[in-house]
Amino acid sequence: MPNTNVMLQSITVQSPGRINIIGEHTDYNDGFVLPAAIDKKTVAHLHRNGQPTRCRITAGNLNETLDIDLDQVKPLAGGWQNYVLGVVHELQKLGAQILGFEGSFQGDVPIGGGMSSSASLECALAFGLNELFDLRLSKTQLIKAAQMAEHNFVGIKCGIMDQFASMMGQKDQVILLDCRSLEYRYFPLELGDYQLLLLHTNVSHSLASSEYNRRRSECEEGVAMIRKKHPEVQHLRDVSLPMLTGFQGNMPETLYTRCRHVVSENQRVLDATQALTTGDIQKLGRLLYQSHHSLQHDYAVSCPELDFLVDQTTGLDFVAGSRMMGGGFGGCTINIIEKKHGDQFVEKVAENYRARFGVDLTPYSVSIEDGAGVLSQAGAL
């Protein structure tokens, strides 16, 4: 029988970054997404310090430290600190009895790469505190707390996909997530002779944060107009392409194209799961290209660097598909490419990219791994 009188004194946990095969900007519209946890992660070390309210946590990659008074958790001007403070605050709102702790975290999820280093940090901390203080919160509660930390302390009204994938990932599986009900289903990612290759633009345009929130607002404006004729519609998830077509010319063109991206992208996610089920890699690749075209033209969240990298793949028979991944305005493209051509392809594209933009890209070959988990722990009677 396990000894239930052992109180954890310290714990080390990990929570990964994520990729998204397809389904961009659909999560905050109650839609469908197809993410997976990856082999890049944040590792957090946490231990009780015996203090009732005093905490200190260090960002190892930056060698910066944050002191926290648990009785006065408030947002700061900006930076990584708000991700930490936000998680602590959201757990407290759920009634969590967090006591003084010290800790540190470090990771290898590229910042600004569209692999959600922020959700990786949020979920590592939420998961670790839940275990250390035996808070007994469910994974769903932890996921929502991490998401709300970003809303309320960071100021990004993100959907739930990133945190869900970081917490719930399974090795070699992608997750079909219904962002309305949070129902989910795993699909094996079996690419055969192909691999996933990320190309990091190493650029981040200043529009990213402000435009992200603007896109969400534009979607809400579109829904409000549609609801006047179709009162059953709550989010773009409820809108079909034929229904939306009826509003062409009857709503501002910008709102129409924003809505068209989300509605069509939801269908592409469902089509992608069928392609995975049947092993049709070429169909999956075509859906990625369609997604990028929609993100570039209808949703307007791409940038010249991302478009250039996708354009470099067109016409190559060893590339099944390519698209921008993440919020946009920088970050990575995700590519499905034959393994035997990967190195040669990267060398050529990197040369062309440097010649065009004067910037070096960074390639990442990623594997699909498990979500948040305990690496080690120590307790005392």
Image (tube, grey):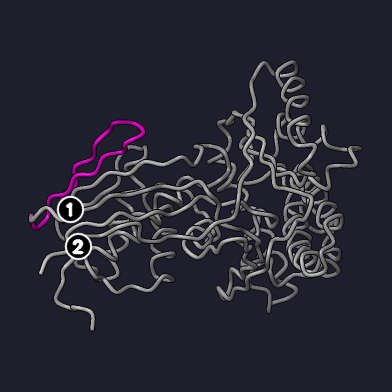
The reply to whether callout 2 and callout 1 are in contact (CB within 8 Å) is: yes
Q: Is residue 96 left or right of residue 197?
A: left
In the image, residue 350 lies at what x, y percent? 72, 24
Q: Quadrant of the C terminus?
A: bottom left
Residue located 72% across and 58% down the image: 262
Pick whichever, 339 or 165, lies toward us: 339
95 in relation to 344, above or below: below
Q: Residue 91 sits in which quadrant? A: bottom left
Measuring from the top left, give residue 169's x and y in whole percent.
53, 62
Q: Residue at label 2?
A: 98
Q: Amino acid at mark 2?
A: Ile
Q: Residue at x 49, y 58 (%)?
A: 166
Left-right relation of 235 to 342: left
Count of numbered tags: 2
Residue located at (43% from left, 54% from top): 15
Residue 122 spot, x, y in % from top left:
39, 53
Q: Secondary structure at mark 1?
A: strand
Q: Is residue 300 above or below residue 22?
A: above
Packing grade of label 1 (10 A; few <14, some 14-19, many >=20) is many
**68 is within the stretch colored magenta:** yes
Query: Which residue was labeled with disc 1?
Result: 101
Picture quarter with the N terminus: bottom left
CA separation, marks 2 and 1? 8 Å
Q: Which residues are magenta?
A: 51-72
Q: Position of residue 341 (x, y in %)?
A: 80, 37
Q: Residue type at mark 1: give it.
A: Phe
Looking at the picture, tell me which residue is in the foreground, 258 or 160. Answer: 160
Give the farthest residue toward the bottom. 1
- Of the two numbered discs 2 and 1 in the rendering, the one whose residue sits closer to the viewer: 1
As drawn, the label of residue 109 is none
